[in-house]
Image: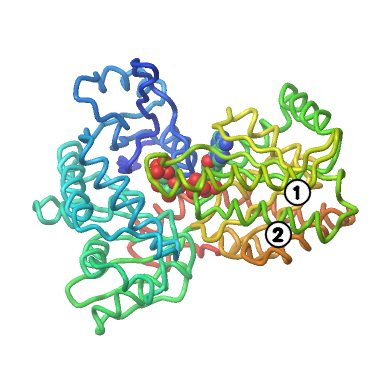
Amino acid sequence: MEPGLRRLVVVSNRLPAALKNEGGEWTVKPGAGGLVTALAPVLRDRGGIWIGWSGASDPTVDVDGLLGSFSAKAGYELRTVQLTEEEVRGYYFGFSNEVIWPLFHDLQTRCHFDPGYWRTYLDVNFKFAEQVARHTGKEDYVWVHDYHLMHQAFFLKSMGVKRNTGFFLHIPFPTPDIFMKLPWRWKIIQALIEFDMVGFQTTQDRDNFVRCVRHFIPECTTEGDGAVVTVRTGSREFRAGAFPISIDFNQFANLATREDIVQKTFKLREALKHRKIILGVDRLDYTKGIPERILAIRTLLKRFPELTGRVNFVQVAVPSREDVEEYKDLRDEIDLLVGRVNGEFSFPGWVPVHYHYRNLQREDLVAYYAAADIALVTPLRDGMNLVAKEYCACNASESGVLILSEFAGAAAQMQDYAYLVNPYDLEGVARAVNRAFHWDKVDRRRMMVGLRDHVRSHNIFWWVDSFLQASFSTNLGDFPPVDT
Ligand code: ADP
Ligand code: G6P
């Protein structure tokens, strides 16, 4: 760790290593998902502690032993919060994934507002806060991540533990009319305003939050007109800012040009007979708009029959939250749709949709990105969407086209160089793909160069610096503007 830097303590639901039980044996696996992808390289470089849930709820497992070697290799300390099966059900699957996740993604009809979930959410948040209090000192900066742990600053304060705290919400913050549906809305606002810094992906999310605070505390004022504002509520003063998260651009870009991956990429293209590849990569989640995307491909083949046999849509979906009913149903729905579209359009030697339901190794993922002519990133709603950025970083040929949902946080940053679409507008998405298919090479290069330049300079290190600088500066004038 560099001298003079305050120790950083990251608190998140998941540790960057997850314990998995495979055939009765516990093993350590690097975690999947945007949060882990984003923070692991940062803590490796700065040093510090990461506090989180190990992913195991079996009390007989030697969690510390298993994580010890991972921790030594990672170059920072890991501290676990042990959760029982019941706690995991109520706090993680229940409140986090069946209440906050759908509500904050504007999908309130998918919410299950179970009061039991709420109580367990509070209990588990208290348990986390106890661990934070135990393993940190006054000088540490405690950076809490995501919707699972919104009560950390509130509980630290209630225990009389003074810490400098920041919170970053990786998912969208909804508009007041949607947020107000939450039975525990005031409690959540009360908890969030106890952080010294509350960070969001976009200025729109930040403004939604401030509007919700104002609803409950009408005398609340804001000062500043940049990415970060100071909010005063009478009893509290804190900052709220927009910090669009990003990726380790160089890591992806370097992998994409490594000889073995270039070979992999070529083999992929060869296997698909050098037809144009349209790629979708997502966690299997109903916010990602996968069924709508498959239907848009169907619309494409119907409206533009000349593309039949000339494109392949490759959808890679990583299994996610499989214990939640909605996710099981989604998996079945996608299986059915893939079968239906392939049944309708395939002919000997050509199948339009290639669907892979699995976690890919980083090398294979990069090869898919590098091989794809068009990335179809069409979430119905998304905090940021790192896949859009990873695709650009891997597009070393600078000839790919990014088709991006206007409802992804990434659209706020990438709108000048991506082809923005409404994911619900199947005809619109089909037209965008058709245009991208025929797009002139010079135009494609111009757009991709613009995208790559942006992601290269606004990378994960820039994101962390922005958040920490804004959190530590005493004067907002010291803080360089963040462009969103
Ligand atoms: P979310 O955080 O909602 O999952 P993001 O697009 O921001 O969405 O991040 C998804 C992360 O998961 C990316 O870093 C991406 O590389 C990774 N990922 C997605 N699909 C796969 C897959 N099939 N195999 C491996 N990694 C995947
Ligand atoms: C999103 C959330 C993260 C979460 C990830 C994977 O990126 O913002 O907090 O870790 O999805 O989801 P999971 O439920 O498997 O942790």
> Looking at mark 1, is its residue's CB closer than 8 Å to ligand 1?
no
Q: Which residue is mark 2?
A: 418
Quadrant assignment for ligand 1 = top right
Q: Is residue 18 left or right of residue 480?
A: left
Sequence-wise first label, 1 or 2 = 1
Q: Nearer the viewer, residue 101 or 356?
A: 356
Q: Looking at the rendering, which quadrant does residue 27 occupy?
A: top left
Amino acid beneath label 2? Ala
Which residue sits at x=47%, y=71%? 226
Left or right? Give the position of 12 relative to 191.
Answer: right
> Which residue appears at 24% of the width and 84% of the height?
219
Can residue 228 be seen from the camera position used here? yes
Q: Is residue 461 visible?
A: no
Say what amino acid the circle numbered 1 marks.
Answer: Ile
Where residue 165 appears, as percent x and y from the top left, is 27, 53
**Quarter of the picture holding the C terminus:** bottom right
Residue 31's disc is: none
**Mark 1–mark 2 distance (CA, rounded to whole Å):** 11 Å
Residue at the image position 21 percent from the left and 33 percent from the top: 82
Provide the residue designation for mark 1: 374
Q: Position of residue 61 (x, y in %)?
A: 24, 20
Name the element at disc 2. loop
- Circles 1 and 2 in contact, beta carbons < 8 Å: no
Q: Position of residue 47 (x, y in %)?
A: 37, 33
Q: Residue at 35%, 35% (x, y): give it.
A: 15
Q: Relative to 100, does residue 136 appear above or below in the rendering?
A: above
On the image, the x and y values in percent for residue 442 come to 88, 55
> Which image quadrant is residue 59 in?
top left
Q: Quadrant of residue 209?
A: bottom left
Q: Quadrant of the N terminus?
A: top left
Q: Residues within 10 Å of mark 2 (few under 14, many from 20)?
A: many
